[in-house]
Image (cartoon, rainbow, N blue to C red):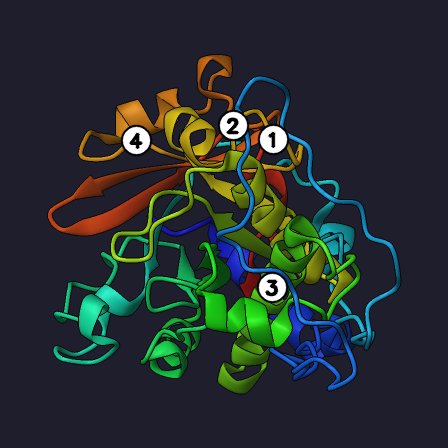
């Protein structure tokens, strides 16, 4: 069931009176190439690490080569000032997520062809839209159409993007371009992760996708596998996180404790979490909000489960009182 009628009326009022608070799209500063004079980054196959200590990632050594202007994202729903004296029930809110599998059949890269999967159920109140066609630097082939699908139905929208270990050609091109020391292997990987994020920022701008937060999806990527070096993998993820933050977005992670540890070990960003429960149930997804399912030290925001070939989501306790911290409503 939709939120109470007063919320719908207040939303209409807020959109007509407070439109100046809507987030601006982030700038198109994606995947910039490195300067010709910059030293070539080392091959990512050179480094060998023994997994016998805590994961360490490189620290930024310089400001980004270009600094994107930050989108104006409200940290407080403009409706809150209008209805702050009205108690909002903190009940789980149903939503969904979609990406390239829901595009019309046959689109995308050969390894990740779309198959026209079902779109969200009518009861969904928000949709988290995937930006990539599997790995980084490969766009969701129907991103703009999915954004319009959400917009035309008056639903709330969010964004997520798969982080992936970069192909060597991307490291060669982009490993020196970013806030890390690109002369080291870990720095070059972090810079390439940084550019993955900026590439996705450009995709959001082109598609008109506005959101206060981007979820970083960390899990195995079939056909684009992570390396066996979890410190190298963590450096990529650290760069991705920094890229979104420098572009003005909040970040969260999507994963499970097992998948996260398998990719990046004990690395922690300490950011909010969207926790996957797989082919289970709404009850199990809500159960993932508990302390037993912490991924990397962050608070639980949503649980996800798969039902009837759809990715379903439900908000965790405490989230429904300020959905604008996580989603945008056009």
Q: Can you tell which of label 1 and label 4 is closer to the viewer? A: 1
Q: Residue at x 32, y 51 (%)?
A: 221
- Residue with the mark numbered 1: 267
The x, y position of residue 84, in whole percent, is 74, 44
Q: Residue at x 68, y 61 (%)?
A: 243
Q: Residue furthest right?
A: 62
Q: Nearer the viewer, residue 196 or 293?
A: 196
Is 105 situated left or right of 298 in this image?
A: left
- Residue with the mark numbered 2: 265
Instruction: Relative to 326, say whether 140 is above or below.
Output: below
Q: CA distance from mark 3 to mark 2?
A: 20 Å
Instruction: Relative to 205, say whether 56 is above or below.
Output: above
Looking at the image, tell me whether mark 1 or mark 4 is earlier in sequence order.
Answer: 1
The x, y position of residue 5, in whole percent, is 48, 55
Decide if residue 25 is in sight here: yes
- Residue with the mark numbered 3: 192
Q: Are marks 3 and 1 in contact (CB under 8 Å)?
A: no
Assign a secondary structure to mark 4. Answer: loop
Q: CA distance from mark 2 to mark 4?
A: 20 Å
């Amino acid at each position: 069931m939709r939120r109470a009628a007063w919320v719908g009326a207040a939303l209409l009022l807020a959109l007509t009176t407070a439109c100046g608070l809507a987030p601006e799209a982030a700038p198109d500063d994606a995947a910039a190439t490195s300067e010709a004079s910059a030293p070539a980054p080392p091959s990512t196959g050179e480094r060998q690490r023994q997994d016998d200590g805590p994961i360490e990632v490189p620290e930024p050594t310089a400001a980004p080569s270009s600094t994107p202007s930050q989108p104006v994202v409200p940290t407080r729903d403009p409706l809150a000032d209008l209805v702050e004296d009205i108690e909002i029930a903190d009940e789980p809110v149903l939503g969904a997520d979609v990406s390239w599998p829901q595009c019309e059949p046959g689109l995308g890269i050969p390894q990740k062809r779309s198959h026209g999967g079902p779109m969200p159920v009518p009861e969904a109140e928000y949709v988290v839209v995937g930006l990539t066609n599997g790995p980084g630097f490969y766009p969701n082939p129907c991103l703009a159409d999915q954004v319009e699908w959400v917009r035309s139905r008056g639903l709330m929208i969010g964004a997520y993007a798969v982080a992936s270990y970069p192909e060597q050609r991307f490291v060669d091109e982009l490993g020196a371009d970013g806030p890390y020391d690109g002369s080291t292997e870990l720095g070059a990987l972090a810079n390439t992760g940084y550019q993955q994020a900026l590439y996705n920022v450009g995709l959001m701008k082109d598609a008109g996708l506005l959101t206060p937060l981007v979820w970083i999806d960390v899990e195995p990527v079939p056909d684009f596998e992570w390396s066996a070096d979890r410190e190298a993998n963590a450096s990529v993820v650290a760069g991705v996180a920094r890229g979104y933050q420098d572009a003005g977005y909040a970040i969260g992670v999507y994963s499970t404790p097992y998948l996260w540890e398998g990719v990046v070990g004990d690395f922690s960003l300490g950011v909010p979490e969207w926790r996957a429960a797989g082919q289970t149930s709404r009850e199990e997804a809500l159960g993932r909000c508990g302390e037993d399912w912490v991924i990397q030290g962050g608070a639980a925001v949503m649980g996800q489960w798969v039902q009837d070939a759809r990715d379903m989501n439900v908000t965790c306790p405490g989230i429904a009182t300020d959905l604008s911290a996580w989603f945008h409503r056009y």
